[in-house]
Amino acid sequence: MEKFDNTIPWQHSHIFDNGNPLAERNTRWAVWLTAIAMVVEIAGGWIYNSMALLADGWHMSSHVMALGLSVLAYRAARRLAHSKRFAFGTWKIEILGGYTSAIMLVGVAGLMLFQSVERLLTPSPIHYDQAIIIAILGLLVNLACAWLLKDGHAHHHGTDSHDNHHHDLNLRSAYLHVMTDAATSLLAIVALFGGKWWGASWLDPVMGIVGAGLVSAWAYGLLRDTGRVLLDAEMDAPVVAEIHDAIKSEPVEAAVSDLHVWRVGKGSYACILSLVVDEAVAPDDIKRYLGVHKELAHVTVELNRVRG
């Protein structure tokens, strides 16, 4: 049997995602800013007896870990990009980072809820002036981090029609972490002013409870979105319907007998397509029909000929 050594024309790269260098750099800056603010808020909440401020500080600690995970995920995906161990590239390392940070948020939300309820049942005096200053500083840090991460997000997106479905979920996890923390900081400020001006000291722990609810809702959304990618549960993605439409609209009479589509990058999908045809056609012809959909980065076609 003749051995074919010249396989180069049929080989292709398994790097389906180019990473997000700007987001990686900005996320590193966000880690340092958030870590400094976290230490200040936790210390201030403890010293000045503010549950809303302390809860915001603990919440911010989860962001430090989550942002750190995002940076590590970017770095690991980049450094392992050429490793042959990964059948479809390393992009899902980033998704795993986002999923892990969402799980961490669930735990932090539970801690915030427990501490807030405890403070609501056993209130103690709060040093409002000092706590307000620290909370405002925390909010400013959150907004600065959100600006950094949003900037990386905006520069990364392309212009194709599916941009809304091609989010960098690792960057989204980092961005929503700081945005949620900004909301929690704002709630803390409202609670502290309410307590100072109107004597509504109960607002402080109540805002901690509200913050726990916000964190839980956000964590659920991120767990859902990253979980879908990790489990390859995206057969309802628009590209699946586009594949069916492309096959129906071409001159070759073909029926889809099996189809598997899963994501291998922010805007890239792999596809295994099995067709039943009643005339001679080459797999390359089918791939050419599907080539108009640029998000299909890796296509495997199986043809089953109906014989009379």
Image: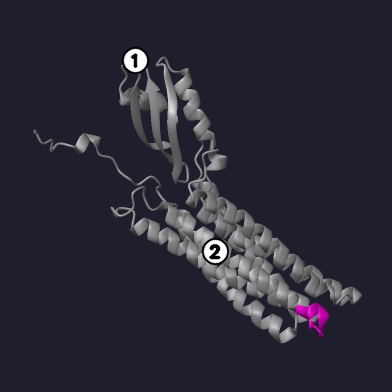
Instruction: Tell me the element at label 2.
Output: helix
What is the x, y in percent for residue 143? Answer: 64, 62
Task: Please say whether residue 56 is visible from this viewpoint.
Answer: no
Which residues lie in the magenta part? Answer: 118-127
Q: Which residue is rendered at x = 24% and y = 35% of the image?
A: 10
Give the number of the disc on residue 62: none
Name which residue type carries label 1: Glu
Q: Which residue is mark 2?
A: 101
Upstream in sequence: badge 1 or badge 2: 2
Whether pointer 1 and pointer 2 mark residues with C-beta atoms closer than 8 Å, the reply is: no
From the viewer's perspective, is residue 289 above or below residue 153? above
Locate the N terminus and report the quarter of the image it occupies: top left
Viewer-proximal residue, 240 or 306?
306
Left or right side of 177 for 278: left
79 drawn magenta: no
What is the x, y in percent for residue 93? Answer: 43, 57
What is the x, y in percent for residue 61? Answer: 59, 73
Q: Nearer the viewer, mark 1 or mark 2?
A: 1
Type of secondary structure dominating the magenta stretch? loop
Give the number of the disc on residue 279: 1
Q: Which residue is rendered at x = 34% and y = 30% of the image?
A: 302
From the viewer's perspective, is residue 7 above or below residue 72? above
Instruction: Tell me the element at label 1.
Output: loop
Name which residue type carries label 2: Ser
